[in-house]
Amino acid sequence: MSIVEALSEGMRKMETDVTDLEEFRKEVRAWLAANLKRRRYSGPQAARTETKTPEEIAESRALQRKLFDAGYAGISFPKEYGGRGLSAAHERVFREESAGYVMPDFGAAGAVTFSAIARSMLAHASPSFLRRHMPKILSGEEIWCQFYSEPAAGSDLAGIRTRATRDGDRWILNGSKIWSTGAYYADFAMCLARTDWDVPKHRGLTWFAVSTKAEGLTIRPIVQIDGEAGFCQEFLDDVVVSSDEVIGEVNQGWAVAQTMLVYERGAGQAGPVVLEPRTLAPDLVALARKVGRSNDPVVRQSIARAHINDYAQYHLGKRIAARLRASDQPQPAVAAYGKLASGTFSPIRARIAVEIGGPEALLWHPDDKRGMRYAVNYLNGRMTSIAAGTNEMQRNGIGERVLGLPREPSFDSNRPFSEVIANARNWDGRVS
Amino acid sequence: MDSDATDDQKVLLDASVRFMQQVCPLTRVRERAYSNITYAAEYRRQAGELGWFSMLVPEDLGGGNVSGNGVLDAALVAYKRGATLQPGPFTGTNVVAHALSTAGSKEQRQKVLPALMSGEASASWAISPPAGHPAMEDGVSAEFRGGACVLSGCKTFVQDVDESCWLLVTARSNAGVSQFLVPPGTPAVRVVALDSLDISRQFSEVHFEGAQLPASALVGMEGKAFDLVAHQSAIAAVLTAAESVGAMDHEFEMTLRYAKDRIAFGRPIGSFQAIKHLLADMSLMLEMSKAITLAAARSLGSDDGYGLEAASMAKAFVGDAGVDLAQNCFQIFGGIGFTWEHDQHLYLRRLTTDAALYGDPAWHRERLCQLSKL
């Protein structure tokens, strides 16, 4: 093929791709209008944990099933596992078109099911595992949650202590997991456990699919600082898991974890469609007017600061998205900028509202349902500084993988994990 | 910040960087080479050839830009200028060129504008009132007597004024905000050169001691300059922010290299989280500064209806971020940063001065509130 032919071939391909996307958009638009309910826009949603009722979950399952049956669940997932086998661009078209409609809402557990969990499974699980679980995930029959963190291991995920012991063709799990959002309504959990204690910490980890109905598994919702109970703690007492429910290779769990963390930090998503903020912090302006402080220069400075930070964060997000699109590889370290920006500025913004409002933000009448929103936002303002990778972990990621600074000296990654934890409390700071 | 530049923009930026490397590297900035009139004239002439002063002037007046968005092109050049702390009234000359293109008389457009674009003459914007005056038009009053106009008062923070420099003076007259184009060498205009924190540029105080100007010195209608001044202020904000981001980028690179090279306690200091996390935070603020400055340049240059607000936001954000970054770099350099021969103090001086120039962060935050009708 000559260069000219190759180019015109490429042009034709590009044209069909574009036509294809446009056709797909028309198809999606028509189907959405005929089958789904419109959503009323209620302004930007503040960060908050959420409690889901069984009725809400049941409604979302029915809606998810409707999408699945029509071919709009797992648009970019392989056909053999229940998806539609189209591109990420098609997935994005659907996201854009469906933004104005009522969509299934499984809360945070839904978000991790369809991004981090399903994507990591595609990369690492066996074909038979994927044939068994993926269609059920896409149809809303199986909602998954994360059994990652433990009471004694969060940022240091490779330091988990839940134990899995082999027993013929099954495994026996013992330990405790925590911060699993939505576990009380999920059907399965993706659970990280230690399968070898006599090797360094990253080399003895394995992932298991654990049914939330399994015998020996206790799930307790945790009441949070805002009074809601969105996440849970679990206790595993001799929970039995079959060998074919292992995800990836035994003792090779850290490779899966790395894929998972990339998606969890948003590098695998196209990102939500957000509008450029062009109205001066409307929530803060309304509050300032309500308390008669809109002419107070200190308050005006704070309102302007909040809006400027919102505006800068929006444009940072666009900049990161462009950099991620320009690269073939997922770049978790680049995505870390967006996470760190949110973790840095969300608490500041929540605090500004409390400073402007004073008693108006801190006190409310018992029958005023919306009266507590500033206080709740304030308490939840640190959520993105801590959840799914603390600010400090993002700083390590940016420092080491973007800026190329040397790693921290590690004294636990080349010794048997059992030896590390036996001596940790008496560590004297000597690395030898 | 120029990673998304078009091919045409890259050609402009590459040529500009080559020019700065040859004519005015940081060593020349340090020696204050630009204070020599012959040197400054040659610098301006070459910069004019590159198109530095034509980007905000429409093509039918002899100007032009490479991307269709002159503010964006100028901001990218400003970013490159900031990296090596370039002297000269780049912002001022572009602001004045814009003002003359928009509101200048036929004579001003035909005689002065071509000289500014070619670099034959320079122009600076006399906007900052002396201490104690909050409004931009304060400091100088204009009074019409017969056919002439008399300017009295003082403006400060006027950048790189020399014998060939035209001054655009924003003043208050009975009719409101008015602007005047003052020719070089006008009697009763006294320029007093000041010493300053920033040693990469020359700032002056300009005294108008009953200076008489013909009515033809007015730029636009008497008392009707309010909107134009707001637009000039936005251009100055974006270009100054862009120069700051260039300086931040360069200083951050210097500091990052030092954190990798400097050994303490048996390892590079950048491996300590106290330093690593500081650098990560600085890097975040730098990325956000780039993002907000580009957004403001795009918005202002495309007249999309949010340019004035975006420009003030960029100036406020980058002003604070720039000073924070310079202070943190100083801390990471430690003792060596206290020496005259190390370059960090040049950047600290520049970024601190940029933050105050053409409206400090607090001023632009208040302006954002007013533009937003709060």
Image (spheres, coloured by chain):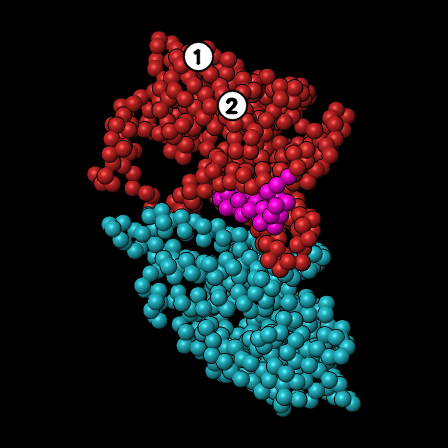
In terms of image quadrants, where is residue A6?
Answer: top right
**Residue at the extreme top of the image, as rendered:** A168
Image side of residue B109 versus residue A425, left or right: right
Q: Residue B370 location in percent, x, y?
A: 68, 60
Q: In which quarter of the image is the C terminus of chain A?
A: top left
Task: Using the image, name the chain to which the residue with label 2 belongs.
Answer: A
Q: Residue at x 33, y 24 (%)?
A: A204
In terms of image quadrants, where is residue B102?
Answer: bottom right
Q: In the image, what residue type sits under mark 1?
A: Gly
Visible residue check, residue B77: no
Q: Residue A126 location in percent, x, y?
A: 46, 19
- Confirm whether the magenta stretch covers residue A352: yes
Q: Which residue is drawn at 64% across and 78% down?
A: B139
Any idea which chain is the red one in this picture?
A: A
Q: Is residue A285 above or below residue A191?
A: below
Task: Characterize the magenta stretch by its predominant secondary structure.
Answer: helix
Q: Which of marks 2 and 1 is nearer the N terminus?
A: 1
**Residue hosting label 1:** A216
Visible residue check, residue B189: yes
Q: Residue at x 76, y 73 (%)?
A: B224
Residue A221 is marked as: 2
- Discs 2 and 1 carry the same chain letter: yes
> SS of the residue at dot 2?
strand
Residue B232 is marked as: none
Q: Residue A262 location in percent, x, y?
A: 47, 35
Q: Can you tell which of label 2 and label 1 is closer to the viewer?
A: 2
Q: Which residue is drawn at 75% across and 85% down?
A: B144
* Range covered by the magenta-colored residues: A340-364
Q: In the image, what residue type sits under mark 2?
A: Pro
Task: Using the image, name the chain to which the residue with label 1 belongs.
Answer: A
Q: Chain B is drawn in which colour?
A: cyan
Q: In which quarter of the image is the N terminus of chain A?
A: top right
